[in-house]
Amino acid sequence: MAEQHYDLVVRNARIATAERSFDADIGIRDGVIVALEQGLAAGEREIDAAGRWVLPGGVDSHCHVEQLSGMGLICADDFHSATVSAAFGGNTTIIPFAAQHRQDDIPEVLDDYARRAREKAVIDYAFHLIVTRVDEQALKHDIPQAIRDGITSIKVFMTYARMKLDDYSILELLSVADREGALMMVHAENDDVIRWLADRLTGLGHQAPKYHAVAHAGLAENEAAHRAICLSRLLDTPLVIVHVSERETVECVRRAQAQGARIIAESCPQYLFLTAEDIDRPGVEGAKYCCSPPPRDEASQQAVWSGLEDGTLTLYSSDHAPYRWDESGKLPKGEKTGFREMANGLPGLEVRMPLLFSEGVRRGRISINQFVELTATRHARTYGLYPRKGTIAIGSDADLAIWDADREVTISVDELHDAVDYTPYEGMKIVGWPETVINRGRIVIDKGELLVERGSGEFLPCATPEPVIEARRSRPADTLIRRLVDAR
């Protein structure tokens, strides 16, 4: 047999996938993994990973990049700074949002967003589509075409005046997604509850950042999540509830799943490592911790941990929503900025995986295989990228992160690579960090250096999401609801 040729060999790797851990060399050719065994022939280039974990590159399926927010503010990160930051944190794929606002047409939104990413991204990317205007053009033409073009996930909001949809519109979009083979995601907060609380708080002169958490009450999240679950159950179609933060919401999701509802749920670092006490800081300092939903109390923090541990919550994303600590973002009115005027969102792309590795794997709360599942594999499965992404297997893209499991790091804004001038995790001491990151066989990061050019990332058309495939396979094909869904 002729000796194999490899562009790159990662030798002496201790590999972990979502299913197992094993030792092997990794042979890479033309950006793809072609061999997984010990004692491979020499490659044109070699990396000795002895003493290191070699994990699939992270897939962050919830991040906001170069996007206009529901408050009318543009993110601090463009596709270059965001993907550089993501890569330094062990990620090789991100899935941000092409956001339609009420006045926008979906094709123009997608064309513009694709151009921005194509010019700047250094790692691979796919897109979700945010829909805020539900009309015949969108339902019959624009959304089906986007799905055919590989954008197979749609996000909707139940809050924010510029973006929220009513239940009827959500049902319309759920039916289109179901019919066309896409997956819906929902930001679940009751807008009327938040607005009622905020009106009364501001009427009494309460403007401090801590009142953001009061207005965005846990019950507002729980009610909206329950309502979204009911809409999903009505059509028997899968739904992702993003950034679950609250104890009762975790329980609501767990009960729904036990009853057979096709609910996927996600949470984020801010709900594991921050609490409402962080928002209650002097002056406007607490604005650094304002996001929606906000960090909750310790009971909710522990509930989120339990949800990740037992599989109730299967996605761990950053919800990276970066705004600078100045008048362009968090403080549009300086020291006089009230909680309703502060940009909602926290940076977190780069620290998402190291935080969970340190506090989850190193402390024994989750296994290394659960870590891979939560940070890479389940994202790729959920959004139609598996097995190209999210695993280490023959035929998969050579997307790898080589981790120094013993490296001690004190998180500091000075050491991060996003375009934000603060981190809510400043001073946190963690153990474990990726030292080499490989995307499609290209060494992107090595020992603190970026080695690829802007625009070298690739767009990833997504296939039919796995939850959609499973739903079609397991439910009755001919029911009254199915006929109603297909009636358009």
Image (cartoon, grey):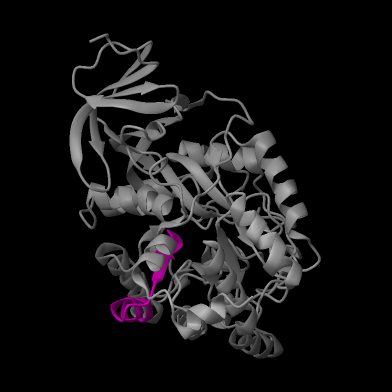
* Residue 358 percent location from the top left of the image: 31, 48
Residue 40 placement: quadrant: top left
How many marks can you see? 0
One can see residue 391 in this view: yes
**Residue 486 horizontal side relative to residue 160, left or right:** left
Q: Residue at x 40, y 31 (%)?
A: 398
* Residue 330 percent location from the top left of the image: 67, 61
Residue 125 placement: quadrant: top right
* Residue 293 percent location from the top left of the image: 52, 72
Quadrant that contains the C terminus: bottom right
**Residue 172 horizontal side relative to residue 23, left or right:** right
> Magenta includes 421?
no
**The magenta segment:** 252-271
The foreground one among 90 and 475 is 475
* Residue 110 percent location from the top left of the image: 70, 51
One can see residue 417 in this view: no
Please say if 243 is above or below 464: below
Q: Residue at x 69, y 85 (%)?
A: 202
Quadrant that contains the N terminus: top left
**Residue 237 horizontal side relative to residue 95, left or right:** left
Residue 160 placement: quadrant: bottom right
> Magenta includes 270?
yes
**Residue 417 horizontal side relative to residue 329, left or right:** left
The foreground one among 335 and 392 is 392
Q: Residue at x 75, y 47 (%)?
A: 112
The foreground one among 297 and 376 is 376
The foreground one among 326 and 109 is 109
